[in-house]
Image: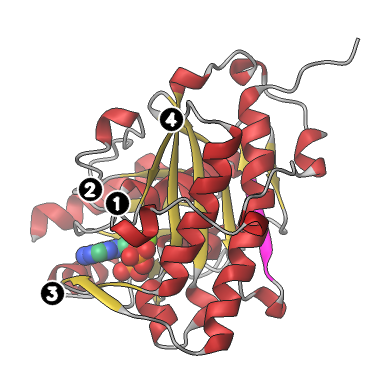
Amino acid sequence: MAQKTALVCKLLASAVSISHKAGKIIRDVMKKGDLGIIDKGENDLQTEADRSAQRCIVASFKSLYPNICIIAEEVDKISQNLDVPKDWLISELDKDILDLECPKSLLNVTEDQITIWIDPLDGTSEFTKGLIDHVTILIGVCVNDDAVAGVIYQPFWKNQGRALWGLVGSGVGGFELKEPPTDNKVYVTTRSHYDKTIESFIDGLKPCEIIRVGGAGNKVLYILEGKAHAYVYPSSGCKRWDTAAPEAVLRAAGGILTDKFGNKYSYSKDNEKDPLNKDGVFATSPAINHIEFMKLISDIQSKM
Ligand SMILES: Nc1ncnc2c1ncn2[C@@H]1O[C@H](COP(=O)(O)O)[C@@H](O)[C@H]1OP(=O)(O)O
Ligand SMILES: [Mg+2]
């Protein structure tokens, strides 16, 4: 008898397929040239690409899994309109993901345990400035408190886009996992939310190389592709939809993401009303001892 596909694997297979369509929607908005920028508040923008990509992703998930809790970044009326063109409703399941063996611990997960956190366009500030390589689509599948599966989709990778995925207990795919250099330490941090607090942290980390780029998904990709040892963001501002998918892919690769005290964020649906990662984001490569790294962070904090 054919084995039933586990729910988490099905959700990841959907996420990969849906991300390809949302990526095409984002590329089309960019091609059209009118981004329809709205300022949501201090240093927090939204464009037609954010709105349309979210509508595609949420409408597709809702039509396939009507009972699963979905939390997406954009909360305005347009973004919440799920009456989308028919070809925006993606029901295919990515075949490579369906071929994966689901880790034992995730085999019996039920719909009520799941929360899907969605950032339809991470790196909006960079997108509006034409820094399209910083942009990603983030879809994180969480079971109770934990981010267990995720897709980081780069819509502008080689002009066609690619989906990078991870499943905790199984592995990662869609890219080549690389180790960071063994000589000097490289840290990646914010481009658009840089301030005095971050500058002091960075000063405490020296000697090192600092790379400033946009997007939480993009920064975790720097780690996964061996271009950085850690992602350092000591301030508030990033939300659970920014970190759910990146954390899942990073964990699947053997890395860790926590707040500045070394504590994990919870991705349960209870966080819907307060999704802020208020104690920052510190993510490390599988090649780095996260506990040792957080001791260094704690020393820097005590001196500030
Ligand atoms: N102060 C903030 N206000 C709004 N969004 C923030 C803030 N800080 C971080 N973010 C979100 O976290 C991501 C990573 O931050 P940064 O690039 O500054 O390191 C950003 O791309 C942005 O997501 P988004 O672009 O989806 O709004
Ligand atoms: Mg974001």
User: The C terminus is located in which quarter?
Assistant: bottom left
- The label on residue 276 is 2
Residue drawn at x 27%, y 76% as measured from the top left: 38
Query: In what quadrant does ligand 1 lie?
Result: bottom left
Q: Which of 271 and 89 is in front in this view?
A: 89
Q: Does the residue labelled 1 lie within 8 Å of ligand 1?
A: yes
Marks 1/2 in contact by CB < 8 Å: the verdict is yes
The residue carrying pointer 2 sits among few (fewer than 14), some (14 to 19) or many (20 or more) residues within 10 Å by Cα, namely some
Q: Which of 124 and 56 is in front in this view?
A: 56
Outermost residue on the top side: it is 1
Marks 1/3 in contact by CB < 8 Å: the verdict is no
Residue drawn at x 21%, y 74% as measured from the top left: 43
Residue 197 drawn at (x, y percent): 14, 68
- The label on residue 239 is 1
Determine if the magenta segment contains residue 162.
Answer: yes
Q: Please state which amino acid type lies under the numbered disc 1.
A: Lys
Q: Which stretch did the figure color magenta? A: 161-165
Q: Name the residue under label 3.
A: 196
- The label on residue 146 is 4
**Helix, strand or loop for disc 2:** loop
Vertical comparison of 274 with 197: above or below: above
The residue carrying pointer 1 sits among few (fewer than 14), some (14 to 19) or many (20 or more) residues within 10 Å by Cα, namely some
